[in-house]
Amino acid sequence: MHSALPAYPQLGSSSRPQCEHRSQTVPQSCRCLLDPGQAMELIYDSFAQYLVTEKGYDEDLLTLAPDSLDFCCKGLVLDIEEGNFLKLAEDGTVLRASHGTKSMTSEEILEIYGRKEWKHFNTVSGMVSRTAKYYLYDNYFDLPGALLCARVVDSLDQHNGQKKYDFWKDMVAAIQHNYKISAFKEDCGMYFPEVKNHPDKYLQRCPESVKKWLKQLKNAGKILLLITSSHSDYCRLLCEHVLGSDFEEYFDVLITNALKPGFFSHTPNQRPFRTLENDEEQEALLSVDKPGWYSQGNAIQLYDLLKKMTGKLDPKVVYFGDSMHSDIFPARHYSNWETVFILEELLGDKGTVPAKAESEPLEKKGKYEGDQLKVPYFVSKQWGSFFMDRLPGLENAEETLVHTWSCKCISTYSTIAIPSLEAIADLPLDYRFTRFSSNSSATAGYYPSPPRALLPNEDSVTMK
């Protein structure tokens, strides 16, 4: 499940010369249309209801304690067969772990996983998440499923004393039941009917500053794209509620059911574009030669369309997304697009910009740079900082801090990282961002400021 909005046009760099200006296109993603707290509870309930009523799991799964969502932390990997959740360091070693919801001690982690690379790290670091061995949780839409799986492990341990686990097939069935392409139209499952009936409860309206920004981009000659893995009927509900009934006027091209990350990795033969009639997909298209609303598709033919629309041989694409796995990694790896990572954790782990890192005069600063941020996204007490953590060690051993694998991915695959679109909406369109690059520090690309955990000599950072 995923939906998308547009991106920033001009990505300059203070660490290397800016590339020659080219016509630019602007896509983005925003699962953040959803209110995180309400939506996470609904998603959890949707899956739990199916497991209990259709698969016979313990009814206790239907009861959600108020503080249990603290378990949800982006970047966790579920080792499915073992029932363990892992937080990985950038070199693939295990920093923290839990069996079900129960945290493992440092001694237990060292005994089970040692000081070596986790056995599936090579594949997970290549962003392969469709496997029976493990699952990567990297966005807020997925995370309630992590909590449910952890509680399933707790339940199976309590009642069956299991050592190996085979619940994943039932979890996949719950996802399919709630989110299959026909579910919105058929009022299937719990999720779509609830969002349809109570959109104000689950959806956040787009700030006027962002809507104004989108219009400014279009007026400046930028091509705006919306690319979402959501089907067209659900996308329309979201966008009408969030942007207004005129939402289509903000975009030149709309692509629904894009099935990311396959949208970026598949060829035209594997994943052709299709037209839509009354939200039903029609015949496959051999090529796409005009703006409009399409379904499925691939980045290769989209880029050919952008060449036609811009009249440029190499139009520059800036892609905004909130999923490393579905958006940022594939857009950079397969299409070599500029990528802007929407990272809500920057709201919950805020730092201060060192004076030497500033790249623009004060009069060109965005609205968040001098203000105190509200923190709508929590930092998990169980899992700690998204960006750094201590290596597990024996009691009284000296503490060693390392970057997390999630943190490493940000600087590797993102051009810049921002907490939200609203954070940059008031900036001039020619604002020059400092980007992540091999020539700059690991914190250079965070805007408006790096996370507190990455700043040197930060006494207030607590890793325990």
Image (cartoon, rainbow, N blue to C red):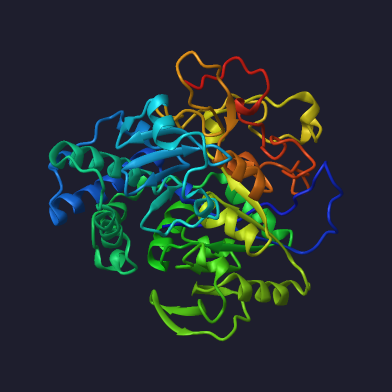
96 left or right, relative to 176: right
Residue at x-position 50% and y-position 52%:
124
Residue at x-position 74% and y-position 59%:
220
Residue at x-position 46% and y-position 47%:
119
Q: Which of 73 and 238 is in front in this view?
A: 73
* Residue 271 visible in the current orientation: yes
Q: Which of 23 and 399 is in front in this view?
A: 399
Q: Where residue 387 sits: x, y (%)?
A: 56, 33
In the displayed structure, would residue 207 be above or below residue 314? above
Q: Where residue 165 sits: x, y (%)?
A: 26, 49
In the displayed structure, would residue 349 be above or below residue 419? above
Image quadrant in which you'd find residue 103? top left
In the displayed structure, would residue 206 be above or below residue 99? below
Give the total number of marks visible in the rendering. Answer: 0
Q: Where residue 140 sits: x, y (%)?
A: 43, 44
Q: Where residue 328 sits: x, y (%)?
A: 59, 53
Q: Nearer the viewer, residue 204 or 87?
A: 87
Residue at x-position 74% and y-position 67%:
315
